[in-house]
Amino acid sequence: MSFATPEDARKHRNIYLAVLVALAVLTGVTVLVAQMHFLSTPMAVAVALLVACIKGGLVASFFMHLISEKTTLYGILVICVVFFFVLLLLPLATEFTNVST
């Protein structure tokens, strides 16, 4: 990664530091939720999964540089959704063929 000016490098450094701080805070939230005994287990798991999804999104977006690949990611997402529904409806289609025979 090359930068045209030192200001570009500083801007990217500041973004990476902000993401690092956000990841550290979210890790602290995960630890606090695990330590809280007044939350029910399903609620604690739901909060931990939400925090994990946010942290994964931050890592993928900024550290893996996927934030600038929106068009490609949306295309892949649409293909995944289509295949998901095809696979979801496939057993239903086979059930109708077994009933008619």
Image (tube, rainbow, N blue to C red):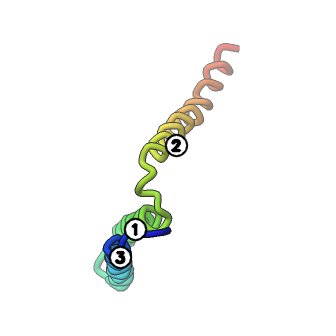
Identified by mark 2, the residue type is: Ile
- Secondary element type, mark 1: loop
x and y, in percent, of residue 14 in the image: 32, 76
Location of residue 21 in the rendering, given as x and y in whole percent from the top left corner: 33, 80
Q: Nearer the viewer, residue 22 or 87?
A: 22
Residue 86, by quadrant, is top right
- Quarter placement of the C terminus: top right
Residue at 65 percent across and 25 percent down: it is 94
**Residue depicted at x 38% and y 83%:** 31
Label 2 crowd bin: few (<14), some (14–19), many (20+), radius 10 Å? few
Give the mark toward the camera: 2 or 1.
Answer: 1
Mark 2 secondary-structure assignment: helix
- Taking the spot 45% from the left edge, 51% from the top edge, the residue there is 69
- Residue 17 quadrant: bottom left
When the figure is inspected, residue 54 is found, relative to residue 99, above or below; the finding is below
Residues packed near mark 1 inside 10 Å, few (<14), some (14 to 19) or many (20 plus): few
Dot in front, 2 or 3: 3
The numbered mark at residue 6 is 3
Q: Residue at x 48, y 38 (%)?
A: 78
Q: CA distance from mark 1 to mark 3?
A: 7 Å
> Which residue is denoted by mark 1 in the rendering?
4
Amino acid type at circle 1 is Ala
